[in-house]
Each structure stands twice: as C-alpha cells, then as structure tokens.
Image (cartoon, rainbow, N blue to C red):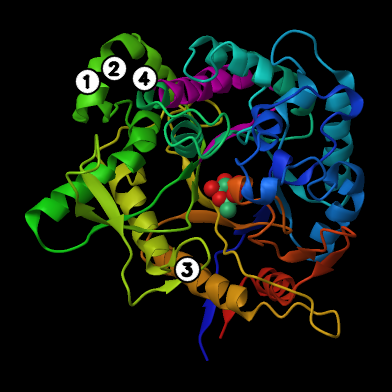
Amino acid sequence: MTSLKFPKHFIWGTATSAYQIEGAPNVNGKGVSIWDTFSHKPGRVANNENGDVAVDHYHRYKDDVKLIADLGIRTYRFSLAWTRILPDGTGKVNSKGLAFYDRLVDELLKYNIEPYACLFHWDLPQPLQDKGGWPNRDTAYAFADYARIVSDHFTDRVKVIFTHNEPWNAAIMGYVTGQYAPGIKNPIAGIKALHHLLLSHGLAAEAIRASAKQSIKIGITLNLSPMYPASKDEKDIAAARRFDIGNRATLDPLLKGTTPLQELAIGKVLTSSLIKAGDLEKIRNLDILGINYYLRMVIKHDSKIPIFNASQVFPHDSEYSTMWEIYPEGMYELLMRIWKDYLSPHSASSPNRGGTKGDGQRPELMVTENGVPVPDGLDFDGRVRDERRIRYLQDHIAQVHRAIQDGVPVKGYFHWSLMDNFEWALGYGPRFGLVYVDYKTLKRTVKDSGRWFANVIRQNGLKF
Ligand code: FCB
C-alpha cells in the first residue's frame, strides 16, 4: 500500500463560478452579462441550454455551503458576478448584489471555510462589451474600479482575492475562436483582449492593495498546458515551442515583466501600439499564482494553420474523457516547469512586485482547478459510483505530491467542481462535481468521489 502525506497546512479546496451555478439572472437588480446574452443566441450552447437556472445556487447557497462544510472542505474558491454588483459594469453600485455575497461570505465563515473570491470568471457586463469589451483598454480601468468596490466592502472578512480566471481562455475562446461569449472571431481582438485582461489584473491589484482593510493576498488563475512535440522531428519541436506561447503569454508578463507576443508576426505589428509604457511593470503584481491543469498538448507542425503553423494531435494509446486526454504526469511536469522557469530562486525571473506588503516575495503556487467530466448517474440505491473520477483524482493528486517531494512548494489543491454545473458551450452535458445535481429537481447528492475527497482531506493525504 502506498501512503502519501501532504505538508502540514496544505490547502484542500473546491471551486465554482458565478454564471455556472447561480442562476437568478434578473433577480435583485442584476445586470446582463455577455454569458446571459451569448447563451440565449440559438446554436451557441449545446441543446441551446443556458445559465438562467443553473443549479440555483443564488437561492440554495446555504445548503451548498453546508455541503462544503460536511465534506470537510475548508477553502472555497467562487466568483462574484460583476453584474450583480455593478449592473451596468460601471457607475451605480447595486447594494442588493453586494448583500448576496455578504450572505455567502458570512455563511462560509460561520463554518470556518476560508473564502477565495474571484472577481472575474468570464461574465463581463454586456454594456462594457457594447463599448468594445476587453479589446477596449477602458474595460481594464472599469475592472479596477469594480475591484476597489469589492475590496472596500469585503476585505474586512475576505483575505484572498483572485482577479481573473484563465485570461488566456477568456481572450482566445471569447474573441478568437468565438466558442465562448462574446463569440467574436478576430485574432487581433483576441491579442488586445489578452493584454487588457492582464493590465486589468495589475490595475485591480493596485486598487485592492490601496483599499484593503487588512493584509490581503492577490492571486490570478491561469489555464496552462505542458506542450509536447508529436515526434523528434525538428519541425514538430519548433511547433510545440511556438504553441507554448499560449502558456508564456500570461506567465511572462505576470512573473517576468516581459511578453512573448512579439514572437508572433501578428503580435509584432500590434504590441508597439497596444502595450503602453509602464503596462508590463503594472501587471507584475501578484501573491498567488493559481494554475488550472486539465490537459497537455501534443503538437505537430501544420502549415495549414494560420499564425502558429501548428496543430494538436491526439495520441491513440492514451485515455480520454469526453473533453480531453487524461495525462496525470502533465500535472507534475507543469508544476516543475513553472517552478524552475519562474518561481524558484534560481529561475530567470526576478522577485515579483507582489507580496502582501509589496515586499518583493515570490508568489505562492497552487492548483486552483483540476477535475474530470464523467457521465455520472444515480444507481438504484441513490448512490453515484463515480470510480473513474476517484481514479483520476488519485492519479493527479499523487503527481502534485511528487512535485512537492521534488522541491516545488505547492500550497494547495482545489477540485473543479463542488457540484455539477453549466459547462459553458457544452451546457449541462459534462458533469464535473463531487456532488451530483439532478437538473430537474435540483436535488444534490454527494458522489462517492465527494466522500473519497473528504477522506483525503481528513488524512491530509492519500492511501492506495
Ligand atoms: C475551466 C474553467 C471552469 C470549468 C472547467 C472545466 O477552464 O475555468 O469554469 O469550466 O474548465
């Protein structure tokens, strides 16, 4: 039997996001977000589903917090809907929106669950999209104002604020491939969106530090995928390196104060006008680097694909979920790479401007999302036997442990997600939860994986 113990004070958590769980899109003064708009356009989401009800967390938050507590989870990462707090994105604050998150935060604290509040998980206010959205630099300043309002109101109780969830995905899926809201297909808009998302992180970090009521940690969550060449052919190796710009486009600005965008022909044209003096310096302001790991990418040279001249291949001998290849070693390799290239004292990057006192400490590293979609269902006795998720989690958590053993100070691991929810363009098909949700009755049932994860937390480790 293998027994893996995690360091004392290792943070075990779970994550959700506002649009994916809350529902209640028109309740108590909430404004319209780009996901409200997008999901109502025919053909954008599988089966034309939308988040109008989602899992009705807005009304059932007390039950959901009790579930978190019952599972023994002591840290909860959730997002605030910008449009509940500022229905138009800027201007008038909606006190009823703040009041909802007051109730949520207070309920979490009642059970000693530490809130990790994320300001933006893709639900941009529609009025800001109407003025150009993230490709418009003004949106970054609007975001900083929103961050200040949240900081003013919540930092008496909330000590960890994440600015963004996966800015690369928000920019690329939202503005280049158009698979996510606002559904735009324009590479130039995508590059602009990415820069302004990152800039808004820096501006928000400044605003939060200036207004926080106590010492606060500021984080960001990135979706990163280790890249592998499809063969030993030099062309494939070069193609994988080019695709790695997808990782470096967020890591380099946040941790080194540089950008790799000039390496792309299209980026060179843009960056001189897009990145203004001082921007990169502002972006490098961080206490917690959160990484979301779901997949690796195997890349081959492909001249048919514009900009990157590279495309993804899917190894035939791998295991797959309904969405991605399953590759647990990628977790280890990613954590090692980030540590070596960006965070260790020997890495090329200089200390960050962040640190709770602005004292130049290097950011902490944690896994803020990892999980797998499994076609779960209730068995005859009402149990959900999601063995495949348990195996997935065991394999991935073991790789986090391996990285810690090899010297990477990983501080925490958050499972995506607390409960089944609205999976963006795929609607309610993929189920990621530790808790099963019957979408007709909205009844919650803890899955076998939920009990398994509770046990991992209790033991602060794994036995298998
Ligand atoms: C991540 C998102 C999260 C969820 C998981 C499956 O990219 O941050 O909202 O959809 O994927």
Would you say residue 11 sits in the magenta stretch?
Answer: no
Give the Cα separation between the discs numbered 1 and 3.
40 Å
Q: Determine which quarter of the picture holds residue 418.
A: bottom right
What's the residue at 29%, 26% (across, down)?
258
What's the residue at 38%, 68% (across, down)?
329
Q: Looking at numbered disc 1 in the image, what kind of residue is underneath it?
A: Lys
Classify mark 4: helix, strand or loop: helix
Labels 2 and 1 touching (C-beta < 8 A):
yes
Of residue 21 and residue 206, the one placed in the foreground of this image is 21
The quadrant in which the C terminus is found is bottom right
Left or right relative to 82: residue 317: left
Q: Which residue is mark 4?
A: 280
| Tag of residue 401 | 3
Which is in the foreground here, disc 1 or disc 3?
Answer: 1
Give the Cα separation between the discs numbered 4 and 3.
33 Å
The magenta span reads: 192-221
Labels 4 and 2 touching (C-beta < 8 A):
no
How many labels were placed on the picture?
4
Mark 1 lies within 8 Å of ligand 1 (Cβ measured): no
Q: Residues within 10 Å of mark 1 (few under 14, many from 20)?
A: few
| Residue 144 shows up from this direction | no
Classify mark 2: helix, strand or loop: helix
| Tag of residue 268 | 1
Sequence order check: which comes first, mark 4 or mark 3? 4
Which is in the foreground here, disc 4 or disc 3?
Answer: 4
Labels 3 and 2 touching (C-beta < 8 A):
no
| Residue 258 shows up from this direction | yes
Sequence order check: which comes first, mark 4 or mark 1? 1
Find residue 364 and report its horizontal and vertical position in percent. 49, 44
Q: Main secondary structure of the magenta part?
A: helix
Find residue 432 and report its horizontal and vertical position in percent. 65, 61
Would you say residue 205 sits in the magenta stretch?
Answer: yes
